[in-house]
Every structure is written in structure tokens, then in C-alpha cells.
Image (cartoon, rainbow, N blue to C red):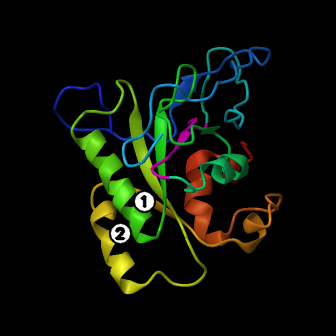
């Protein structure tokens, strides 16, 4: 959701087509977010990979994302380590960080309340200028199915923005981030480019 555009139809771009850059040109490392805390609570991994194409050719490259936590303990550090992208913690993306935002929350009641507040900030145009809200990422707060009262609270979020679900992963709890993401998170892996080897 663009925050710097006039009213009108929105076009969601999931894998921008860009002109290839020379292989020697490496993107600058993004520093930690410094643009202020994300509403909903008090207040890095490397970029997505893309290869060089031949002269004059266009090549689709994975979009780079900033993981923004809507509350403490949302899991942005783990997600950035597994899927790639920039971990902003509870801050808005700072200078040099990707402008495409993935809002992250746990699936407990507090997390769902926090993500709704952050979505409202985007809806009102109060997020920092130039940010794109690409999706919400809901990380399981416990193993097993989401209780019905919580599942009902997720539906209104899914009605206004793409939502990706990440299940409970016991290995991540133990600090083992070496394996592939779980099958349930494959749509998120495709979005971030991990499914194509970009990390």
C-alpha cells in the first residue's frame, strides 16, 4: 500500500522487473531502523540476491523487504535470518533499508491487536512517506491450530491485506535456523525470493 500516492487504483508489484546492474556493483549495507517506533508498542540480514543479465536485457529480481515488528517478540530477527531481508525490529525502516514493509505479529490476542493498529497507521497515511506495505506475516505463538476466537480476528486483516502464516517451528525455538522453512510458509518463501535461492 503506497503512502505517497494520490487516490486511485493501486497496483501491487510482487517482483519488480529492473534493469540489471553490473555484477561488481554491490548494494550498500542497510543500517538499523532509525525513523521512530512502530505504533502498537514501545519503541540485518543481507539484501535479496539478483544476478546480472546480458546488456540491454531486463531481469526479474526478488524484491527486498524490511521486517517490521508490531510488538515485542514478534519474530522479525528470526524471519530475516531465515527468509532474508532487513530486520527493523520495532522501528520503521531507516535510511538505506528497503522501503517494502512486511508487518510481523504473533497470533496471540496482543499481537493481533498490535497488527490492526499498525494497519490503521498505513490506512490513515500516517506511516513514513515512501513505505510500501506489502503484507502481514502472522507467526504462530504456540504449536497446533489457532483457537477459533483468534482465527476470527485474523479474517478482517486478511480482508484488507495479503497475510502470510508461519507455523510453530520447534527448531527455531532452539536457535536452529539452518533448515528450509516449513511447507506452510512456502508462499512467504516465494514472496521473499527464498524459493528461488535468493537469500
Residue 122: percent from the left, percent from the top? 30, 40
Question: Is 97 drawn above or below residue 12 in the view shown?
Answer: above
Question: Is 131 drawn above or below residue 120 in the view shown?
Answer: above
Front residue of this view, candidates 45 and 109: 109
Q: Quadrant of residue 163?
A: bottom left
Relative placement, left or right, of 47 versus 142 is right
Magenta residue check for 193: no
Q: Image point 38% across, 55% down: which residue?
A: 115
* Residue receiving disc 2: 154
Q: Which residues are magenta?
A: 62-71
Question: Is 21 drawn above or below residue 142 in the view shown?
Answer: above
Q: Residues within 10 Å of mark 1 (few under 14, many from 20)?
A: many
Magenta residue check for 63: yes
Q: Quadrant of the N terminus?
A: top left
* Residue receiving disc 1: 163
Q: Image point 48% across, 29% down: which residue?
A: 99
Question: In the image, which is nearer the foreground, mark 2 or mark 1?
Answer: 2
Q: Earlier in the sequence, mark 2 or mark 1?
A: 2
Residue 94: percent from the left, percent from the top? 52, 25
**SS assignment for the magenta stretch, majority:** loop
Q: Quadrant of the C terminus?
A: top right
Does the CB distance between marks 2 and 1 fall below 8 Å?
A: yes
Q: Image point 41% across, 64% down: which residue?
A: 110
Amino acid at each position: 500500500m503506497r503512502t505517497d500516492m494520490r487516490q486511485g487504483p493501486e497496483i501491487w508489484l510482487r517482483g519488480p522487473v529492473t534493469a540489471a546492474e553490473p555484477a561488481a556493483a554491490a548494494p550498500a549495507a542497510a543500517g538499523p531502523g532509525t525513523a521512530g517506533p512502530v505504533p502498537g508498542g514501545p519503541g540485518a540480514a543481507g539484501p535479496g540476491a539478483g544476478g546480472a543479465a546480458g546488456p540491454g536485457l531486463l531481469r526479474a529480481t526478488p524484491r527486498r523487504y524490511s521486517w517490521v515488528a508490531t510488538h515485542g517478540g514478534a519474530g522479525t530477527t528470526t524471519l530475516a535470518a531465515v527468509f532474508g531481508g532487513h530486520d527493523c525490529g520495532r522501528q520503521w525502516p531507516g535510511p538505506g533499508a528497503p522501503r517494502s514493509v512486511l508487518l510481523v505479529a504473533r497470533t496471540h490476542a496482543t499481537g493481533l491487536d498490535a497488527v490492526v493498529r499498525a494497519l490503521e497507521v498505513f490506512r490513515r497515511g500516517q506511516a513514513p512517506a515512501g513505505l510500501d506495505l506489502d503484507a502481514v506475516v502472522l507467526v504462530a505463538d504456540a504449536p497446533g491450530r489457532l483457537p477459533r476466537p483468534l482465527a476470527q480476528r485474523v479474517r478482517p486483516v486478511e480482508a484488507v491485506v495479503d497475510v502470510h502464516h508461519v507455523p510453530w517451528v520447534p527448531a527455531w525455538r532452539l536457535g536452529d535456523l539452518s533448515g528450509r522453512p516449513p511447507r506452510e510458509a512456502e508462499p512467504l518463501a516465494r514472496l521473499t525470493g527464498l524459493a528461488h535461492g535468493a537469500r
